[in-house]
Amino acid sequence: MQVLLKKAAGLEIETICPLHGPVLTENLGYYLGLYNTWSSYQPEEEGIVIAYTSVYGNTKRAVVQLAEKLKANGAPTVVVHDLARVDMAQAVADAFRYSKLVLATTTYNADIFPFMREFIDHLTERNFGNRTVGMIENGSWAPMAAKVMRSMLEKSKNLTYTETTVKILSALNETSAEQLQSLADELCRDYLAQQDATANKNDLTALFNIGYGLYVVTCNDGKKDNGLIVNTVTQVTNTPNRIAVTINKENYSHHVIKQTGVMNVNCLSVDAPFKVFEVFGFQSGRNVDKFANCEPLRSDNGLVFLPRHINSFLSLKVEQYLDLDTHGMFICSVTEARVLSDRETMTYTYYQEHVKPKPKTDGKKGYVCKVCGYVYEGEELPEDFICPLCKHGAADFEKIQ
């Protein structure tokens, strides 16, 4: 499906005829977005699902407390499912719909309660992945549930496990209650950082996430928000903190930032899907509203920061500008710095090896775009050819060998 969507991106689609379901003729961008989300196994919404089984009610009491703590910490949605009583299909659907999952169950014959085993089997056979997972295990003297659940999830890809696992010995005590609070804080760290009232706006450890990586720089031209992908962000001094951001002069953001003197640098994390790079790297803010279909979050300077797929962001004020011929370098002071998660920063190498789709060139003759992998089939590539995906010109194509 991902390969198909990439090929379809260069077409003007008028009708979608699914094998199952109605023929689609309107609002196709929305439906294509859903196809992309589902086929890349990304969450549809931010939120936390708690799926549990409880024999005597003690695990349930822990789950109820956790749900209250998550809501108090700003979790946008908290969904709780008792797997012994809920429609299993609904629980599975919610696990795929939301971004985080907590599994809470009892040790049962040195294994886990059957309804939880069935639930995890449903997830893994449907390629569950790209989620944050926390666990609560219960056992009268030797809890085994977390170990069993984690082993069942080994076939799942790109799961991030919380550092905290809550271990209950029959009922909550002081130790496990503290673990429950730690789990709630860990799961909501990014939500707390997104809210003005609870964010640490001077967390300069955000500077540690700067490397030779990939970033989304956001700005605003006075009418709409804009963003672009850059890979040249550097901390140049620490007393005072100064950040250098280099942007191609042909990019619309260069013009906007030079006029406004402010920007946000969003540090992408390794969970960022290729769709992020398509939106912010393969189209221009001169003629596209890159934030048209979302409700953006804003920092103190009024600019957008991304709600997902970043581990931190920096709000910058331009102090100096250096003309570098084709590019401009903005030397900036830091006005705000927030850390949202501990996820690893997306490096350029990681993007090339794990995120960027590999071009399908086997058996084909023609040229391949070095930027996005689009394949032009033909003997000669026109000099004025523009890639339909990333909009780069013929100079960025190479002949298929």
Image (spheres, grey):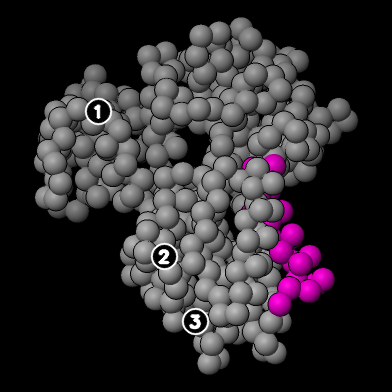
Q: Which amino acid does label 1 sit on?
A: Asn
Q: What residue type is labelled 3?
A: Phe
Q: Which amino acid does label 2 sit on?
A: Val
**Residues under labels 3 and 2: Cα distance?**
15 Å
Q: What segment is highlighted magenta in the picture?
A: 171-192
Check residue 166 for magenta coloring. no
Residue that label 3 marks = 113
Q: Nearer the viewer, residue 279 or 188?
A: 188
Residue 124 screen position, x and y as percent = 39, 69
Residue 247 screen position, x and y as percent = 56, 22
The disc, 3 or 1, on the residue closer to the chain's N-terminal end is: 1
Residue 336 screen position, x and y as percent = 75, 28
Q: Main secondary structure of the magenta part?
A: helix
Residue that label 1 marks = 27
Label 2: how many Cα within 10 Å (few below 14, some 14–19, many 20+): few
**Residues under labels 2 and 1: Cα distance?**
33 Å
The disc, 2 or 1, on the residue closer to the chain's N-terminal end is: 1
- Choose top left, top right, bottom left or bottom right for residue 105: bottom right
Q: Nearer the viewer, residue 386 or 222?
A: 222
Q: Do the residues labelled 3 and 1 touch (CB within 8 Å)?
A: no
Residue that label 2 marks = 86
Label 3: how many Cα within 10 Å (few below 14, some 14–19, many 20+): many
Specify whether residue 245 is in view.
no
Callout 2 secondary element: loop
**Residues under labels 3 and 1: Cα distance?**
44 Å
Up the image or down, 11 lies above or below 287; here it is below
Numbered disc in front, either 3 or 2? 2
